Every structure is written in C-alpha cells, then in structure tokens.
Image (spheres, rainbow, N blue to C red):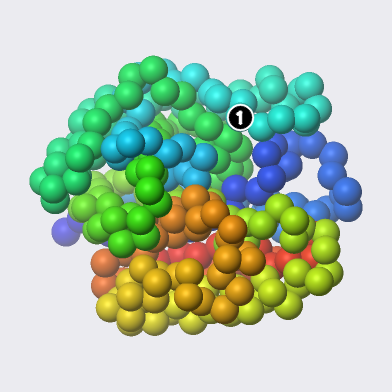
C-alpha cells in the first residue's frame, strides 16, 4: 500500500530573512528551526510548492528541467541576491499535475520559462537544504477565489500517494503594517486562534470555514489581501479527510506566526 504523505502550510518569512542579520537577531530563528525539521518524511520523491508570490490567469506549473531563481524581494543585502538552490525541476510531474487538474475541470498549463520565486527557494533552503529532490511550483489563480483553491487542493490529493510532498507556502498573518506594532498583537492573536480552530475542525466544517475566511475575526486586518493565505486552502483541500492542526507557532515582531500540518 502506498504511503500517504502529510501536507503542510508553512510560513516562508520576510524575503530572505533566514539568511541575513535581523533585528532582533533571533526574530526568525524558531521559524527557521521548524522549517529545517520537516521534509524528512519517508517516501518523499519530489516537492510541490504553492507560493503566495505567483498568480496567473490559469493554474500554471513550472516545467523547466532546471528552473532558475527569481529574487523577487527588494532592498535586502547584496549577498541575498546570490543565494543558490540548484534543485532540479520535473517536467513529468508538471505534466501529471496538469492532467490531474484538467481531470477535475480546472484549466491548467505548464510554463517552461518560469523559475522559483522566494516563496519556494527560501524555505526550501531550510526544508531540504541538499536540494536533492525535484521541485515544481504551482501558481495561484487570479481572482483568488478560496473555494477554487480548495478544489485545486482536492485535485492534487492523489500526489500524496505518489511520493510528492505538498507545501502551501505563505504566511498565517500578512499585514505589513502590523509587524512591529503591539497594537496588532491582539488582532493577529484572534485570527490565529480562528485558524487553529478551523484547521482542526472536521473536513466539511474546515472547508466551509476556509471558504468564508474573510468573515473570521480580524480577517481583513490580518490579510488585507489574501494571496498569502490561499496556499492554506490548497493544503487543506489536498488533506482530504485527514485531520489538521497547528504544529508550530512563534511570535515574530509582535504577531503570532503559525505553521500547520495535515495528516
């Protein structure tokens, strides 16, 4: 019987934050340690990342055999624009993903020119530092419909039995005005509690709550725009009937940052 891999929603931090000096110095240390602790599940043959930093008119998957890196962050130290993550791509996995999506009525295509944005290579430098597994990235779909991204996750679920580790890469809190502002601490805490209750709910309730996420306490104050939350919808959809829970939480610059595991 095939081993069904877990699915994760991971916080990918702020730009290249794990690989530079920060103030305070240990701001991202706990997040880095947690990211370094996952990705060692037995049976992992490839990694699929859905990042909050790529939106496309249709769901689009990288298909280059050797993807480049996109340094899509600004104003950081020079050395962070020379970071390397030489993981191979997988045209075969890209084709499989397109087939799965089209089989569920979701328009999808491949992009051989697209590289990995920092929502992919920055956390993977910790999750799988050896860069020894093929990696593909899958976009969000413009319009950012949460129900559609839950459906995307459900379409991807068979990959869990095919050795593909699915990572939704975003942030549980993503209001740039809130970082470093103590006034946002209780706001972010309310939304984080709702996230914890939601991912731990039964699968039907979980999907209903995530589809209506904008009605949650402090939702739009925590995510003025939802692109960094939608990778959670994909992860939850891929989880199927498996339970979910918050398995990592830390306070970073006055607000809670959480990571989730399903299965």
Q: Residue at x 69, y 45 (%)?
A: 14
Q: Is residue 185 left or right of residue 241?
A: right
Q: Residue at x 83, y 63 (%)?
A: 181
State the SS at label 1: loop
Image quarter of the N terminus = bottom left
Q: Residues within 10 Å of mark 1 (few under 14, many from 20)?
A: few
Q: Residue at x 49, y 29 (%)?
A: 116
Quarter of the view holding residue 240? bottom left
Q: Position of residue 262 (x, y in %)?
A: 40, 66
Q: Position of residue 166 (x, y in %)?
A: 38, 50
Image quarter of the C terminus = bottom left
Above or below, comparing residue 76 to residue 67 in the picture: below
Q: Is residue 246 visible?
A: yes
Residue that badge 1 annotates: 72
Residue at the right extreme of this rendering: 24
Q: Residue at x 55, y 25 (%)?
A: 70
Q: Position of residue 168 (x, y in %)?
A: 45, 52
Q: Is residue 161 visible?
A: no
Above or below, comparing residue 120 to residue 210 in the picture: above
User: How many labels were placed on the picture?
Assistant: 1
Quarter of the view holding residue 48? top left
Above or below, comparing residue 173 to residue 80 in the picture: below
Quarter of the view holding residue 100? top left
Q: Position of residue 125 (x, y in %)?
A: 59, 37
Q: Is residue 146 left or right of residue 215?
A: left
Q: Is residue 196 left or right of residue 89?
A: right
């Amino acid at each position: 019987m095939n081993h069904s891999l877990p699915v994760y929603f991971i916080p990918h931090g702020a730009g290249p934050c794990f690989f530079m000096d920060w103030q305070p110095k240990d701001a991202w240390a706990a997040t880095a340690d947690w990211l370094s602790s996952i990705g060692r599940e037995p049976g992992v043959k490839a990694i699929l990342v859905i990042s909050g930093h790529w939106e496309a008119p249709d769901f689009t998957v990288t298909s280059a055999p050797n993807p480049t890196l996109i340094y899509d962050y600004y104003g950081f130290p020079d050395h962070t624009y020379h970071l390397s993550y030489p993981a191979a791509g997988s045209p075969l996995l890209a084709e499989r993903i397109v087939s799965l999506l089209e089989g569920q009525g979701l328009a999808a295509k491949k992009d051989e020119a697209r590289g990995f944005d920092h929502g992919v290579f920055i956390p993977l430098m910790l999750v799988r530092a050896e860069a020894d597994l093929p990696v593909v990235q899958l976009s969000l779909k413009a319009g950012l419909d949460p129900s559609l991204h839950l459906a995307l996750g459900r379409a991807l679920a068979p990959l869990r039995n095919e050795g593909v580790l699915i990572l939704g890469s975003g942030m549980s809190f993503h209001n740039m005005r809130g970082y470093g502002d103590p006034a946002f601490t209780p706001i972010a805490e309310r939304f984080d509690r709702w996230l914890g209750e939601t991912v731990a709910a039964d699968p039907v309730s979980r999907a209903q709550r995530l589809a209506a996420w904008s009605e949650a306490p402090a939702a739009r104050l925590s995510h003025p725009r939802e692109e960094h939350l939608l990778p959670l919808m994909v992860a939850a959809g891929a989880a199927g009937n498996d339970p979910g829970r918050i398995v990592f939480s830390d306070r970073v610059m006055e607000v809670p940052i959480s990571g989730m595991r399903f299965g």
